[in-house]
Image (cartoon, helix red, strand yellow):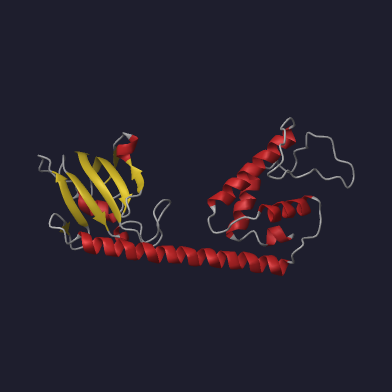
Amino acid sequence: MNTATRISHTALGVSLLLALAACSKPADEKAETVEAAPHEQPAIATETSEPTFESLDKKVSYGIGINIGTQIAADQNIEIDLDSLFAGLRDATAGKDPRLSDEELRAAFEAINARAQEAQAAKARESAQASAAFLETNKQRPEITTTDSGLQYEVLQSGDGEAKPTTSNTVRVHYHGTLVDGTVFDSSVDRGEPIEFAVTGVISGWTEALQLMTVGDKWKLYIPSEHAYGERGRPGIPPNSALIFEVELLEIK
């Protein structure tokens, strides 16, 4: 088992191997190029090269590079040194022994993972503090109603209906969701299409609020993180984030 395989359980190792797997050929597929002479290795292009893509292998090589680059760019926990990256690629494709030992590489990957975890924990703490401070200030406003659960809401417009959704209903709504700093993370309004879902099929802050609304109501919800996505967060929503939604109830089914 080579070094790359042994350390592939780390976050970056996994992302690189997945990128390679996405573009690699099956093991039993024959290459469609002339076999290289002994000891000859294809050159690995650097960022200053201007490759052409006239062969199948060059096109696939470029695709592998795009996949690896996309995976790397998405990982904000490491600043990739391209010279070192290309050196590793050249050594591996040339069959050379790694310049760093297994122990050195393992220690480096463990350290980068520990750094990433600490950065995530720090971000979660910052988000929790900002959310708590925002909600504490927000609830002092006279137009804000705070429920026993800690959910806050503001009535923007009132409908003329009387029926309210129950946990057995499906509803159709328009919504616009932001973080407390105003960052938009999701919006049916921006997409121009309302969404339909079960009252119990959403975060608990929504489930509670919907059962208080009637058709035609438009409320602004301020949802504590424990009634949203909590410590886990989700893409675009940091852990421990309070969420703000403008919600318009269009229909109860």
Residue 176: where, in percent of width, then height?
A: 29, 44
Q: Is residue 60 left or right of residue 114?
A: right
Rendered image quadrant of residue 169: top left
Rendered image quadrant of residue 105: bottom right
* Residue 213 in sight from this viewpoint: no
> How many numbered marks have been drawn onto this rendered protein structure?
0
Outermost residue to the top: 54
The residue that appears at 78% across and 50% down in the rendered structure is 93
Quarter of the image where the N terminus is located: bottom right
Residue 132 vertical position relative to residue 55 in the rendered view, above or below: below
In the image shown, does 245 or 202 lie closer to the viewer? 245
Quarter of the image where the C terminus is located: top left
Residue 86: where, in percent of width, then height?
A: 71, 51
Outermost residue to the front: 48
Residue 181: where, in percent of width, then height?
A: 33, 54
Q: Is residue 201 left or right of residue 20?
A: left
Residue 26 vertical position relative to residue 104 in the rendered view, above or below: above
Q: Is residue 230 left or right of residue 62?
A: left
The residue that appears at 20% across and 41% down in the rendered structure is 249
The residue that appears at 22% across and 62% down in the rendered structure is 137
Outermost residue to the right: 38
Residue 37 vertical position relative to residue 10 in the rendered view, above or below: above
* Residue 175 in sight from this viewpoint: yes
Rendered image quadrant of residue 28: top right
The residue that appears at 78% across and 37% down in the rendered structure is 31
Residue 130: where, in percent of width, then height?
A: 32, 62
